[in-house]
Amino acid sequence: MRVFIDGDAFPNLLKPILLRSIERLSLESFVVANKKINIGDSGFVTYLIVEQGADEADHKIVEMVEVGDLVITADIPLADRVIAKNAHAIDHRGELYSVDNIKQYLAMRNLMESIREMGEVTRGPKPFSQKDAHEFANQLNAFLAKNR
């Protein structure tokens, strides 16, 4: 299993958590973004900088991901594409996306996008917190224990 990190908007609180897991389990990992995103120094982490563009990092991740790999992303359409390739996805707040729940998350995301396009002002996500980082760490550890 390899780990792919969607570097766009990756929370700083998660960087040391993720790096510890990568090092502890010797996980081949890739940070993919359209600018330099540093989660820390490790011989197990490769940094890939892609062309500028809204979905260039997503396209690269989908191109590289294989069955059983793990992608860490808050991008629901990317998670949907990853799951379609029989890989796994976890978001920054510890939600494990699966075949059973991804279509529901995608439908809600698309509904909210449509509402915003009609001019409605909606609240964005709540600020990322230490509690969210804790939930991510728990989900990541549980996933790695089960799938390693």
Image: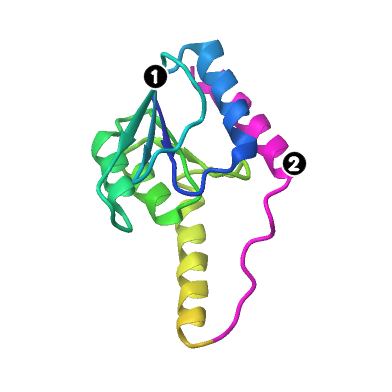
- Left or right: 61 with respect to 90? left
Q: Amino acid at mark 1?
A: Glu
The reply to whether callout 1 and callout 2 are in contact (CB within 8 Å) is no
Answer whether residue 141 is magenta in the image: yes
Q: Which residue is at the front of the view, 6 or 69?
A: 6
Please provide percent x and percent y for residue 102: 47, 52
The residue indicated by pointer 2 is 130
Q: Specify the farthest residue to the right.
A: 131
Quadrant assignment, res 122: bottom right
Give the answer, above or below, for where 119 lies relative to 132. Answer: below
At x 52%, y 73%, the residue is 112
The residue indicated by pointer 1 is 28
Q: Specify the farthest residue to the bottom.
A: 119
Q: Amino acid at mark 2?
A: Gln
At x 56%, y 27%, the residue is 18
Quadrant assignment, res 60: top left
Answer whether residue 71 is magenta in the image: no
Task: Compare marks 1 and 2 and give the one earlier in the sequence.
Answer: 1
Q: How many marks?
A: 2
Give the answer, above or below, for where 58 lies relative to 122. Answer: above
Which stretch is magenta?
120-148
Q: Which residue is at the front of the view, 3 or 86?
A: 3
